[in-house]
Amino acid sequence: MDSPLVGGLLAFAGGSAVSLLNYFINLRTLKNKPSALASVSVARQVLSIGYLVLVFFLARVLPWDEVPLLLGAGVGLTVPAVLLAIRLAKVNDSMKKTRSDTTGKGDDGNG
């Protein structure tokens, strides 16, 4: 249980959970008020940075070194975030197509 790999995997799982939470925040904002998507980036960054700070300070009381924990947390925040951003872009594209089909106008709003 004292293996650095176990600590890194646990930190990766936590980072993935934070990435998933950020995805759901983005998705909800995109569906409810797309114009506010940029303003929720502050909340997402606070969550991500807060998780890294939490891992850093918890590493002192956990049986693992800081390096594997921070690496796992960083990869856990990054890789799922990239994959979920691709998924979010597809959702955004499908929402644009739905909106343009119902209004009869193109993407630029001029027809």
Image: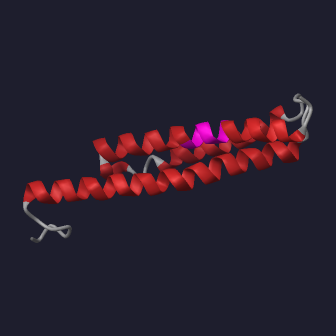
* Residue 18 forms part of the magenta stretch: yes
Query: Residue at coordinates 34% horizontally, 47% vertically from top-left?
Result: 30
Q: Relative to the observer, which residue lies in front, 82 or 43? A: 82
Q: Is residue 61 visible?
A: yes
**Among the 4 quarters of the image, the one containing residue 29:** top left
On screen, residue 27 above or below 78: above
Give x and y (percent) for residue 41.
49, 50
**What is the x, y in percent for residue 28?**
37, 40
Front position in the image: 39 or 63: 63
> Measured along the vertical axis of the image, is residue 63 above or below residue 8?
above
Horizontally, residue 45 falls left or right of residue 9, namely left
Left-right relation of 34 to 12: left
Residue at the spot x=36%, y=56% of the render?
A: 90
What is the quadrant of the N terminus in the image? Answer: top right
Rendering quarter of residue 32: top left
* Residue ID at (17%, 55%): 99
Q: Quadrant of the C terminus?
A: bottom left
Q: Is residue 38 visible?
A: no
- Image: magenta residue range: 14-19
In percent of width and height, residue 71 lies at 78, 49
Along the viewing direction, whichever of 71 and 45 lies nearer the viewer = 71
Secondary structure mostly seen in the magenta stretch:
helix
Residue 20 pos. (x, y %): 53, 40
Is 23 contained in the magenta span?
Answer: no
Q: Is residue 16 left or right of residue 66?
A: left
